[in-house]
């Protein structure tokens, strides 16, 4: 149960981080309206707050979070950007998630 909650929290954290970076990208590269920077800042604030909810050392949280971030970023690439993922993308995501699980189980 604890690993499931951690995993779901990491997914929410990754979405907040990616959205917080994606919106400024739209402003800077795709000429989207400047007001998108406000929800971007709020999203990055949410990202930091979500990371702070974990009850273990920050370095361990960041290391485990990295595995989930990799997988969520690839799903974002597929869903938002419409890029077809390769078998090596899926394999890399699976390896990253196993690494996250190994670290998180050790908590």
Image (cartoon, helix red, strand yellow):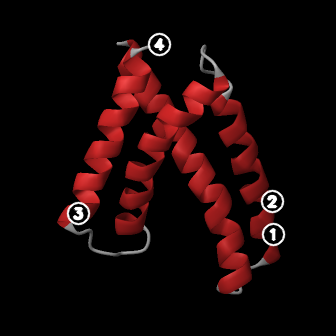
Q: In which quarter of the image is residue 99?
A: top left
Q: In which quarter of the image is residue 78?
A: bottom left
Q: Can residue 32 be seen in this view?
A: no
Q: Label 1 belongs to which residue?
A: 35
Which tag, 4 or 1, sits closer to the chain's start?
A: 1
> Can you tell which mark lies on residue 107?
4
On screen, residue 89 above or below 53: below
Is 40 placed left or right of 34 in the picture?
left
Check if mark 1's residue and mark 2's residue have beta carbons within 8 Å.
yes
Q: SS for tag 2?
A: helix
Mark 3 to mark 2 CA distance (whole Å) = 36 Å
Image spot of residue 48 (x, y percent):
71, 37
Image spot of residue 42 (x, y percent):
76, 49
Q: SS for tag 3?
A: helix
Q: Label 3 belongs to which residue?
A: 88
Mark 2 to mark 4 CA distance (whole Å) = 35 Å
Q: Nearer the viewer, mark 3 or mark 2?
A: 3
On screen, residue 20 above or below 30: above
Q: Label 2 belongs to which residue?
A: 38
Mark 1 to mark 2 CA distance (whole Å) = 6 Å
Q: SS for tag 1?
A: helix
**Image quarter of the N terminus:** top left
């Amino acid at each position: 149960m604890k690993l499931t909650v951690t995993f779901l929290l990491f997914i929410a954290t990754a979405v907040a981080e990616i959205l917080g970076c994606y919106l400024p990208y739209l402003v800077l590269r795709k000429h989207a309206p400047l007001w998108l920077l406000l929800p971007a800042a709020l999203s990055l604030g949410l990202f930091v707050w979500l990371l702070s909810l974990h009850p273990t050392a920050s370095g361990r949280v960041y290391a485990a979070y990295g595995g989930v971030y990799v997988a969520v970023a690839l799903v974002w690439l597929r869903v938002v950007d419409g890029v077809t993922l390769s078998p090596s993308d899926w394999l890399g995501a699976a390896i990253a998630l196993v690494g996250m699980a190994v670290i998180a189980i050790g908590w």
